[in-house]
Image (spheres, rainbow, N blue to C red):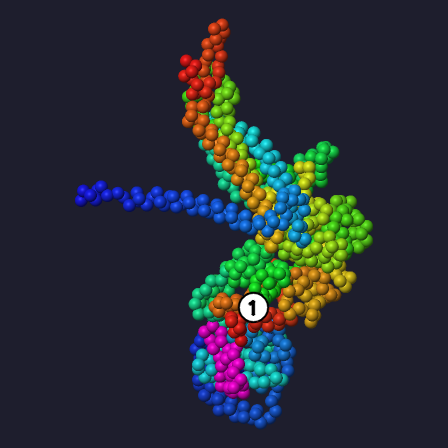
Amino acid sequence: MREKIVTKDPGEGIFPHVTAMAAILIILLSGSIFFVVLSGAMPALKKFKLSFIFSTIWDPVLDIYGAAPAIYGTAVSSFLALLIAAPLGVGTAIFLTELAPGWLRKPVSYMVELLAAVPSVVFGLWGLLVLAPWLRKGVGLFLDEKFGFIPLFRGPFLGVGMLTGTLVLTIMILPTVTAISREVMLTVPLDQREGMFALGATRWEVIRKVILPGSKVGIVGALLLGLGRAMGEAMAVTMVIGNTFIISPSLLSPAQTLSSLIVSEFPEAYGMQLSALMLLGLILFAITLAINIIALIMVNRSAARLKAGKELVPVQISMPYGEGALVLVKKKNLSKME
Amino acid sequence: MRKVNGFDFQGWLNLKLNGGGINLKNRIISRALPLMVIVSLLFSLVPVNTLASNISIVFDGRTVASDVPPVIQRGTTMVPMRVIFEVLGADVEWDSSTQTITAKKAANTIRLTLGSRTATVNGRTVSLAEPANLINNRTMVPIRFVSEALGARVEWVAATSTVRIASTDASRLRSPVSSEIRLTTGGATFPFPLYSRLFAEYRKVTRPTVTIDYAGVGSGAGIRGLIGRTFDFAGSDAVMSEQQIREAGGEVLHIPTVMGAVAIVYNIPDLNRRLRLTEETLAGIYLGEITRWNDPRIASENPGVTLPDLHITVVRRSDGSGTTAIFTDYLSSISKKWKDTVGMGTSVRWPGTTVGGPGNAGVAAQVAQISGAIGYVELSTAILNRLNFAEIRNSSGRFIAPSESTTIAAAAGFGGNVPKDLRMSLVNTPGANGYPIVGLTWLLVRRDQTNENIAKVTVDFLRWAVLERNLESFTADLFYAPLPQNMLDIVRDQLKSINVNGNPIWK
């Protein structure tokens, strides 16, 4: 009887193996996805080689393919979306962690997270049926009429195009940027804030000197994750970007992105066209993978910095002939200052 | 009492079949039988009283086309065996040594012998008023007997000389295979709403149940699935190329299901009547050569219409699509410049500045929003979105608007020149009243099958859907046109060529 009590739960032995298998399965899965995309892309890679990236022709009838306008469209729409989403998202995160009254924080956070749960096709429909007509009659018309002489705003604006695509992407990556920035800001230790306030710092000073520096790397990571999402987004962008395979300096011109070209043509594609689409996928895969890896490294470094005591601590220094100054010192260096 | 040419119609056909069993009105029969024998003996002495007729046959509300008209023989309406069994969806076997016809439909089997007044229904002998026989070298069978024996209801409408046959739940049932089976198919997205309803209905009428799954993944993916044998058959808006058929490693049959028109929709404010476009103007607009609505080339064909000085925004599909294939096929057929510089395909390199919308709905939304826009969509999308669509000049020089009837007229323009493999384009056909931008959608089936049960289901489904025209009851809101008879005749030949190891499935 006694031995039975001592006997281990069979789960003890199995559990680590099960989890290890799950982990290995995920690695195998991503590996095989990469392999399938790569092998599918091989014919196009062999035929077009490096010129694929620079060519601006996409002709399924003659089977000649290039990716430059799609790469350009992906890069421009994503970076512009990030440019708008960064101040909005980080601002919202600061408001939620530092400024908002307690009763408001939870509901607004939920709303932001809810935005992330809206299916992308809903954003696309909204973009096509609400945003596009509104932009065409309002902002787009105004920009074209007043600033049409600048290539950036040259019309005619049809409602769909780079501008509309960018704005829809902005809304879509906002929850990513906001939620992660908020999480990172919450990791800034409470004693630092309280220390700053105790030393007489204003809210503005606390945000500027403690919160933002302390979560800088994490925020950059959040922005990069948002960028990754913007680049990979297909359905919503397809509906509003105009899907025209050109490189135009104008924001009002229709454009094309890697993911929207793939999602548009994949169902009917065959032969070399299919292979070229796979190659687009491979390019997108490489770009988003690189961005995600950079983002993860940065987020991790921010966490590691906290552990290593690299975060900054406010210290009141007494000056021999003055009133003294408030400075920030890396925590691990505190001992040296004594 | 229903009377046909003075004869007591019901008196000759007093067979009533309820469900599978036969409820003979014994007393009447026992009295009438000697009389019938005498009468038939009398008739056999005089020349056969055969009347060609203008009788029409209506099955479930649709007129049944028959190459040989029904005849009335001694008061019994006789129809060609092939026509009636095809309508009822029965399998027929002909034994030439005993001159016996055997027709099977789900649980019912009937056996008729040429010239014999007795027949069997599910093994039980019944007597016939008029035997099956050869008239003008065609095997003719009594329509009421065979229809009722296979579970349908028959009604004679004297006023219009119409035999109305209505299927019943029992007569709709079919049993292509002896155990439940599931087929995996997929392809073209445009006919997806039609196919999904069709497969659901087919599932209801099969015992044991046949489930056909259809993935709306696009024509290209459908063809890939057929070649890779992941799909048992595939849907496609475009025909397979020679190269693709070679890759499939065996003959692939193209079975057309429906045909539809592509409408040219436009958004011109305050236009007082329907726009007319010649083929040159339409090509000019899509080539980017005509850029304003008040261009003299458009105005000259539209006298009395005030066209605005408005930029033409060209809208096209952003996704690869069969609609694009039909439209670019049309532009290639009427414009040499288009053929040389752009060509035809499910997606092409569009000249000039254009806007791409995803799907028919995406193009419709863009055209509806942008003042001065022109686009191409399936007719149903144009009508459902209340968009204006243009009359296009056809090969006979007439301006024709898209509709079901002008679509049929376009197909009729082919006349007897329908290619035997049905891999045909319906754009710009010679029909005088035909709309010029018309296309077909196909189901692609391997001729040489490997699995007998899958082959049986495939053949039975296509017979039921296409030859027995069951799909037509699902096309009302899609504005598709039914296939003309000459195409159906070829479809029948194609279905009969489907085989497993050289043994045809449909004998």
- Residue drawn where x is 34% and y is 44% of the image: A15
Name the one closer to the observer, B10 or B494. B494
- The kind of secondary structure element at disc 1 is loop
Residue B95 in magenta? yes
Picture layout, residue B77 above or below residue B414? below
Please provide percent x and percent y for residue A310: 45, 23
Quarter occupied by the N terminus of chain B: bottom right
Tell whether B207 sits left or right of B87.
left
Q: Which chain carries label 1?
A: B
Q: What residue type is labelled 1?
A: Arg
Percent position of residue B38, x then y: 52, 92
Mark 1 — residue? B447
Left/right of residue B280 with respect to residue B165 in the rendered view: right
How many numbered circles are shown?
Answer: 1
Magenta stretch, residue numbers? B92-119
x and y percentages locating residue B67 in the rendered image: 63, 77
